[in-house]
Image (cartoon, grey):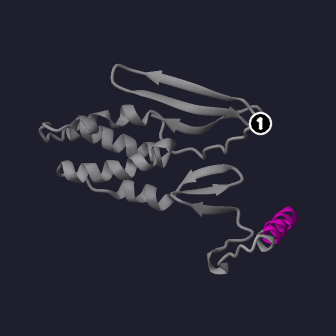
Amino acid sequence: MENHIDHLRAVLECMRTNKLYANADKCIFGAEEIPFLVCFIGKRGLRADPAKVKAIVDWPVPANQKDLRKWLGLANYLHKYSENYAELARPLSTLLKKDAEWCWDTGQQEAFEAIKESLLQAPILALPDPDRPFSVVCDASDFAIGCALMQADGEGHERVIAYLR
């Protein structure tokens, strides 16, 4: 906590010197993690916003292309937390093609549930360290490609920074 206070003091002094002001009602001090866009950032890394994951998981089965497009739009926003997202979403994406006939069967239902489960099991993503080397792990099929940006942590364990599609 002492380091936090020292860093906070330095930031506030820099802000004052440059005539920058913060709205105290919007500030969070001494927190283990803070919300930022659609994630939470903490010392262990980035995790998906549980409210967004819950919205995806609680979404009813889409009844048409419009419903599916809305759900996939929300799920796509969190794709970096989902391993093999492109492959999981493929049966659903085919329903969004211009002349596709709407046919929701077991393949689509399984894909719908697999994406939900993938986001429920989402890892805490590591924060990138520019002083350490990165690696990219790729996998491809005839229909999709997926990659993971990885980096070893201080203990030598490979951690996911983001899943890419």
Spot occupied by residue 13 in the image (x, y as percentages of width and height): 83, 71
Q: In this view, does 164 lie above or below 123?
A: above
The answer, for residue 142, to whether it is visible in the render is yes
What residue is shown with label 1? 131
The kind of residue on which mark 1 rests is: Asp
Say whether residue 5 is left or right of residue 73: right
Locate the N terminus by quadrant. bottom right
Residue drawn where x is 26% and y is 41% of the image: 109
Say whether residue 66 is left or right of residue 40: left
Answer few, some or many: residues within 10 Å of disc 1's Cα (few below 14, many 20 plus, some between 14 and 19): few
* Farthest top residue in view: 142
Spot occupied by residue 138 in the image (x, y as percentages of width and height): 51, 24
Predominant secondary structure, magenta span: helix
Q: Is residue 88 above or below residue 81?
A: above
Say whether residue 82 is left or right of residue 159: left
User: How many marks on residues?
Assistant: 1
Residue drawn where x is 27% and y is 34% of the image: 91
Residue drawn where x is 42% and y is 37% of the image: 85
Residue drawn where x is 35% and y is 58% of the image: 58
Q: Give the range drawn in magenta.
A: 1-14
Residue 38 inside the magenta-drawn segment? no
Spot occupied by residue 11 in the image (x, y as percentages of width and height): 79, 66
Of 37 and 121, the residue lying toward us? 37
Of 105 and 101, the residue lying toward us? 101
Residue 4 inside the magenta-drawn segment? yes
Locate the C terminus by quadrant. top left
